Image (cartoon, rainbow, N blue to C red):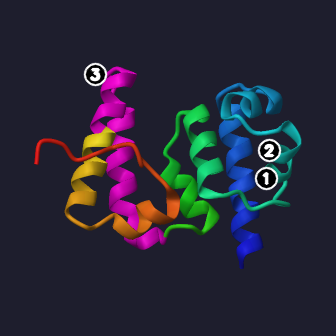
């Protein structure tokens, strides 16, 4: 079953890269991974870590959580609402990129504070630098 998820992930990454009009080499450079490794991920030959997926998502300007679900790292049912919330923030044309990232960090810090994201954050290493403040 993992290979099906990896294949689906690779196809999705290739589609997102082409939509962003990036070559494989450009995306690899932007994500800080090797060109051959990214090619293997796209072809479904490698299962990347959550950290690599986060780097690729950032380079593509898409939700890391979407990639986590496609890779089988996060449960799709449980994470749908969180992914949709993040997608709405990222899609809001009235916010600039910095504002979107700040909102996402605040959202994550509240989720961590409430204990709803503790296990996922530890496993994925997502938003590890976001700290709840002034408490």
Cα–Cα gap, marks 3 and 2: 33 Å
Residue found at the very far right of the displayed protein: 36
Instruction: Tell me the tag on residue 94.
Output: 3
Res 33 → quadrant: top right
The residue that appears at 30% across and 23% down in the rendered structure is 95
> Which residue matches tag 2?
38
State the image coordinates of residue 50 (x, y, percent, origin top left): 59, 56
Instruction: Tell me the tag on residue 4.
Output: none
Q: 15 or 2: which is nearer to us?
A: 2
State the image coordinates of residue 5 (x, y, percent, origin top left): 69, 68
Instruction: Tell me the tag on residue 41.
Output: 1
Is residue 68 toward the left or the right of residue 35 in the image? left
The majority secondary structure of the magenta stretch comes to helix
Q: Quadrant of the N terminus?
A: bottom right
In this view, the mark in front (3 or 2): 2
Q: Which residues are magenta?
A: 75-103
Cα–Cα gap, marks 1 and 2: 5 Å
State the image coordinates of residue 10 (x, y, percent, origin top left): 74, 53
Question: Is residue 89 covered in magenta?
Answer: yes
Q: Is residue 7 above or below residue 24?
A: below
The reply to whether the C-beta atoms of the residues labelled 1 and 2 are less than 8 Å apart is: yes
Secondary structure of the residue carrying tag 3 is loop
Q: Residues within 10 Å of mark 1 (few under 14, many from 20)?
A: many
Question: Is residue 76 covered in magenta?
Answer: yes
Residue found at the very far left of the displayed protein: 135
Secondary structure of the residue carrying tag 2 is helix
State the image coordinates of residue 84 (x, y, percent, origin top left): 36, 52
Residue found at the very far front of the displayed protein: 135
């Amino acid at each position: 079953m993992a290979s099906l998820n990896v294949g689906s992930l690779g196809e999705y990454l290739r589609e997102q890269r082409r939509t962003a009009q990036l070559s494989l080499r450009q995306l690899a450079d932007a994500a800080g991974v090797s060109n051959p490794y990214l090619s293997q991920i796209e072809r479904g030959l490698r299962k990347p870590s959550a950290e690599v997926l986060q780097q690729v998502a950032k380079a593509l300007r898409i939700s890391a959580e979407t990639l986590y679900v496609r890779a089988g790292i996060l449960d799709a049912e449980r994470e749908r609402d969180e992914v949709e919330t993040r997608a709405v923030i990222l899609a809001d044309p009235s916010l600039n990129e910095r504002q979107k990232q700040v909102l996402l960090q605040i959202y994550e810090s509240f989720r961590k504070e409430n204990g709803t994201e503790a296990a996922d954050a530890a496993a994925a290493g997502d938003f590890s630098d976001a700290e709840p403040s002034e408490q």
